[in-house]
Each structure stands twice: as structure tokens, then as C-alpha cells.
């Protein structure tokens, strides 16, 4: 099922695939919030920009996000302050507040219809929950010292008693309608957008970006792909996770207001109105990509049913996040490349980071200084702050590399897989990802992820093959959905 943001999508402009070689000042790979904000900003500065998108505008994580815009971080301000100290904690709030203001200004200037609304953000726990153990004093002090006004939470309209804090003047919108609006404006300003144009290769030296059908040559190349494509050192320390979302209509008509982070242990809640219908959305059930356990959608439905008078569930979807080992995003020029740029490591906060990334990268392309470029530099090396996660994630990859190859079950024939089942198995000495659809069609792929040769795992909730090493994901036919792999899983004819 699609994310709730697609409800009410009418007459969305579509953009033709790339079918002939072309030249540009800037080639941008990816039409999410990062790519399209960069494209629009550069087009306004007179650059010729081509955007290549593997799927559709907003079809990556932007269109699967919660649509919350805030200057702090969903994981809390105290954790970034502990790791980096007061100055960086303040910079995070200032840079992110500026980015939220940029989004608001673009919406106003171009009349983008995406239900932008200033709203408070709440971080709460169930009242008198002695088990929760959240350190409110530490979080309040970190926010206040970073320059935010923090108050005790009033009632965000939840049907259970809570205690916690409130930060005023944050915002919410429909993230898909926002980027669709950006695409329309960018296109009117001369940006050429191509959907259904997966990039398969980038030659940094030549400045060429190649799809299955044609090639774009550009002076600058921007990876606005959420994670860098192909092999990149930054992937090594990244924690890659999936999160799930469920929305519902309520019988009572009483919906919560604002951004709500419920520390129980963690669910993100918000409401959304589309036409005459309102919905409550819950996000949670985070796990490492490729390590799905249990029925995450059912757990979220049960969470909603426990707390709200659910009339009907209206949609469900999932999305992926990349958390950097030192807690800050990587934005700007790639190591050793002065005309190739990336933006990654946004964790669950990337609508705002992606907008900031667009500001920084656009300034770098245009040869202008940006006050935030050094702080979030993609070339930084921070072993002291990165070591713990870096070591953990590399051990995790090594474990999967060995364990998954050694523990693959053996089948005589791929035909042994029953309808509705998927298995990774060794057949005739080769690791295969085998799936039989409910109507009996057998789909046999190589189980070896083309990115770094790990073995993919079946994700039952999404019917996808997910790589536990660096988060590449593939549909049942092997095509890349997201992640660092440029290439599909090889098809095997049986
Ligand atoms: C469940 C969930 C909820 C979230 N909610 C929020 C929130 O409320 N607020 C917030 O600030 N952040 C949120 N985030 C994070 C945020 O959504 C992302 O960090 C942000 O949308 C990333 O934007 P992007 O443009 O960089 O990436 P994307 O939106 O993923 O765009 C990248 C694009 O690149 C394309 N692409 C990839 N490879 C290729 C290729 N080879 N060729 C061509 N195109 C390619 C993809 O198809 C995709 O469209 C959430 C994340 C999750 C997982």
C-alpha cells in the first residue's frame, strides 16, 4: 500500500525517461527533497540542471516520511550535545531552523499546496510511567542551552495522560505534495527532470552519468540519492534501519495535534487531513534493514487500537534511514573530488537536513561560501566520535558475510518453494533468492547483492529482498528499490 501522502494526488505531472544524450552544468541524481531543492536553487541562479530519478518524484524516502519539520533531532538534543558539546548542539538548532524557514519561504513564494502549518513538537511519556526512565532534565537543558524555548507539555490531544516537553513553532506538511510542487516550479524554471531513469554508472573524472538508455555530461554531479551509490567509505559506519507507518480513521473525531514523539519506548504520532477525512499516523518498529522480525504492521495497528478508537486503517508503508556514526549528516564534496557532491546520514531528520544540504551544495557549485559547509563537511574524519558505531557496523557486516553464506539451506530444486513463500537457498552450488508468488509464478534471482556481495534476506512485510550489510533493497524481480547498489539482482532462469 502507498504512503498516505498519495491520497488526493490528482493530475500529478509526470516526466519522461532520459532517452538521448544531454549536457548540463549540473546533473543531479535523485528527485527527493535534497535533489529537487538543489535543482530549484541552482536553476534560479542560472545553471542548466538535469535531474535523473530512478522511480518518480518523491518516490524515495521523502514520500515515505512523516512530514515533520523541526529544529531539534527526533533522537533528542541531549545525545548530540553529549557527543559534540554546546557549540555544535547550538549550530544544529540554528542550521535546522534556517532550513525550516527556507521550506516555508519556498512554499509561500511559489504557492506550493502542501498543507504547511506551524505546529508545536512534543516529546512525552505516559504520565506516571516509572519504567520509562527518560532523562527530562538533561533533554530540557540541552534544548534550552541550544537556544530553544522549552515548556512543559500541555495536552497534545492524546487519549492518554502524558508528561513531557513542548517546543513551539515547528511545522508539518505533506512531504510528497511539497516535492511534487518543487518539481513543477523547477521544471518551469528550466530544470529537465527524467523519471524512471535509474543511473547505472557515474564517471567522476569525465563528469558522465549513465542510465540504461543514455548519458548526461555535466560539470558538476550531485548524489541526492539518500545514500551514496556504488562503493563509498561513508557507507562503512552507517547504521541502516527500516521503520514502519500505519494510519487510521478514528470514530471519535478527536485527533492529536502537532509533532508527537511518545517515549514508550518510541513512537512518532501525527494527524493529517485530506479533504473531509482525517487520519492519525503512527511510525515505529525500527529495525536494522535485512533483519525484519515479526509482523511490524500488526504491532503498529495494535498500538493504535490500544490508545485510540480506531474506525478503520487507511494505509501502511515503510521507509529507510541512514544514521551516521558521529550523529551529524555528511554534506558536500566527496573525498578527492571537487565537482562531485553528496548528502547522506540524515537519520530520521532528513527533510530539514536535505534542505540544508541543498543550500550548502548549491553554494559550493556556485563558488559561494556557506556558513554551514565546514560543520557538516562530507570529508570530515571523526574517529573519536565515530568509533563505537563504526566498529559495531563493520562487525555486523562481517558477521552477515560469513554467517549468511555458511547457513544457507540447500535445496535440490528451486521448485521446492511453495506459493507465497520465499527462501534463500543454495541450488547447484549457487546462492539463490527464490520467491513463488501466491499465483504460483516462480521468480529466481541471484541472492548475492551486487554492491558488496552480501546475501539478501526476504522482507515479508514488503515482499522485497533486503541486504543487511548496507541497505540495498530489491523488488521480487530483482530491480533496485533503494540503497547503494546500482545494479539489480541477477535473474536466473530455471
Ligand atoms: C519512517 C520515516 C519517517 C521519516 N520522517 C521524517 C520527518 O518527519 N521529518 C524529517 O525531517 N525526516 C524524516 N525522515 C527522514 C527523511 O524522510 C529523509 O532523510 C529524507 O526524505 C531524505 O531525502 P533525500 O531527498 O535525500 O532522499 P530520497 O527522498 O530517498 O530521494 C532520493 C532519490 O534518489 C533516487 N535514486 C536512488 N538511486 C538512484 C539512481 N541510481 N538513479 C536515479 N535515482 C536514484 C531515489 O529513487 C529517490 O527518489 C523519515 C525517515 C523515515 C524512514
Image (spheres, rainbow, N blue to C red):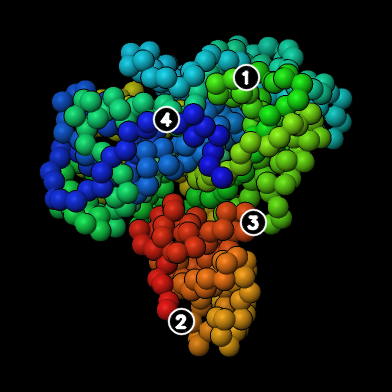
Q: Which mark is residue 10?
A: 4
**Which is more N-terminal, label 1 or label 2?**
1
Count neighbours of disc 1 (C-alpha within 10 A) and say few if under 14, some if 14 to 19, many if 20 or more. Answer: many
Determine the secondary structure under disc 1: loop
Q: Nearer the viewer, mark 2 or mark 1?
A: 2
Q: Which of the 4 quarters of the picture holds residue 33?
A: top left
**Which is more N-terminal, label 4 or label 1?**
4
Judging depth in this view, the residue of 494 and 328 nearest the camera is: 494
Pointers 2 and 1 in contact (CB under 8 A)? no
Count neighbours of disc 4 (C-alpha within 10 A) and say few if under 14, some if 14 to 19, many if 20 or more. Answer: few
In this orientation, does residue 1 appear? yes
Residue 377 relative to residue 427: left or right: left
Residue found at x 15% / y 40%: 24
Residue 21 relative to residue 124: left or right: left
Residue 378, percent from left and from top: 37, 41
Task: Name the residue that disc number 2 marks.
Answer: 494
Q: In this view, does 138 lie above or below 237?
A: above
Task: Name the residue that disc number 3 marks.
Answer: 292
Residue at far front of view: 439
Give the distance between the C-alpha atoms of the residues marked 2 and 3, in whole angstroms.
Answer: 28 Å
Q: Which of the 4 quarters of the picture holds residue 9?
A: top left
**Which is more N-terminal, label 3 or label 4?**
4
Q: Residue 258 carries which label?
A: 1
Q: Nearer the viewer, mark 4 or mark 3?
A: 4
Residue found at x 68% / y 46%: 297
User: Is the residue indicated by label 4 positioned so its CB lies within 8 Å of ligand 1?
Assistant: no
Residue found at x 45% / y 22%: 114
User: Is the residue indicated by label 2 positioned so its CB lies within 8 Å of ligand 1?
Assistant: no
Q: Nearer the viewer, mark 2 or mark 4?
A: 4
Amino acid at each position: 500500500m502507498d504512503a498516505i501522502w498519495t491520497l488526493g494526488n490528482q493530475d500529478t505531472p509526470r516526466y519522461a525517461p532520459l532517452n538521448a544524450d544531454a549536457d548540463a552544468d549540473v546533473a543531479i541524481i535523485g528527485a527527493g527533497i535534497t535533489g529537487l531543492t538543489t535543482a530549484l536553487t541552482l536553476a534560479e541562479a542560472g545553471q542548466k540542471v538535469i535531474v535523473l530519478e530512478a522511480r518518480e518524484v518523491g518516490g524515495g524516502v521523502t514520500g515515505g516520511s512523516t512530514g515533520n519539520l523541526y529544529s531539534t533531532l527526533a533522537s533528542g538534543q541531549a545525545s548530540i550535545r553529549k557527543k559534540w558539546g554546546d557549540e555544535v548542539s547550538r549550530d544544529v538548532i540554528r542550521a535546522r531552523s534556517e532550513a525550516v524557514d527556507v521550506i516555508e519561504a519556498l512554499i509561500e513564494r511559489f504557492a506550493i499546496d502542501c498543507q504547511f502549518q506551524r505546529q508545536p513538537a512534543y516529546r512525552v511519556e505516559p504520565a506516571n510511567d516509572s519504567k520509562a526512565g527518560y532523562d527530562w532534565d538533561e533533554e530540557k537543558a540541552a534544548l534550552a542551552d541550544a537556544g530553544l524555548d522549552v515548556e512543559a507539555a500541555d495536552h497534545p490531544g492524546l487519549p492518554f495522560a502524558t508528561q513531557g516537553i513542548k517546543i513551539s513553532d515547528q511545522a508539518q506538511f505533506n512531504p510528497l505534495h511539497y516535492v511534487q510542487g518543487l518539481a513543477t516550479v523547477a521544471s518551469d524554471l528550466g530544470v529537465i527532470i527524467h523519471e524512471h531513469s535509474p543511473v547505472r554508472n557515474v564517471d567522476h573524472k569525465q563528469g558522465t552519468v549513465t542510465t540504461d538508455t543514455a548519458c548526461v555530461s555535466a560539470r558538476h554531479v550531485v548524489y541526492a540519492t539518500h545514500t551514496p551509490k556504488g562503493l563509498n567509505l561513508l557507507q562503512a559506519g552507517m547504521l541502516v534501519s527500516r521503520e514502519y507507518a500505519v494510519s487510521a480513521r478514528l470514530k471519535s473525531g478527536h485527533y492529536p495535534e502537532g509533532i508527537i514523539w511518545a517515549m514508550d519506548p518510541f513512537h512518532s504520532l501525527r494527524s493529517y487531513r485530506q479533504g473531509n477525512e482525517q487520519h492519525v499516523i503512527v511510525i515505529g518498529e525500527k529495525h536494522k534493514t535485512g533483519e525484519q522480525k515479526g509482523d511490524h504492521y500488526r504491532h503498529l495497528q495494535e498500538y493504535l487500537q490500544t490508545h485510540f478508537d480506531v474506525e478503520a486503517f487507511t494505509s501502511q508503508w515503510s521507509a529507510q534511514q541512514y544514521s551516521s556514526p558521529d550523529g551529524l549528516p555528511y554534506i558536500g564534496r566527496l573525498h578527492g573530488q571537487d565537482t562531485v557532491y553528496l548528502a547522506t546520514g540524515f537519520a530520521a531528520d532528513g527533510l530539514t537536513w536535505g534542505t540544508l544540504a541543498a543550500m550548502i551544495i548549491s553554494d559550493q557549485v556556485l563558488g559561494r561560501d556557506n556558513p554551514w559547509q565546514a560543520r557538516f563537511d562530507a570529508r570530515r574524519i571523526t574517529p573519536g566520535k565515530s568509533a563505537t558505531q563504526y566498529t559495531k557496523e563493520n562487525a555486523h557486516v562481517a558477521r552477515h558475510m560469513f554467517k549468511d553464506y555458511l547457513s544457507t539451506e540447500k535445496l535440490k530444486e528451486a521448485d521446492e518453494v511453495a506459493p507465497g513463500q520465499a527462501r534463500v537457498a543454495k541450488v547447484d552450488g549457487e546462492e539463490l533468492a527464490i520467491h513463488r508468488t501466491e499465483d504460483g509464478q516462480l521468480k529466481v534471482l541471484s541472492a548475492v547483492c551486487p554492491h558488496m556481495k552480501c546475501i539478501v534476506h526476504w522482507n515479508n512485510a514488503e515482499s522485497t529482498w533486503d541486504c543487511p550489510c548496507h541497505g540495498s533493497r530489491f523488488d521480487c524481480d530483482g530491480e533496485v528499490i533503494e540503497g547503494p547498489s546500482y545494479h539489480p539482482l541477477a535473474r536466473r532462469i530455471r
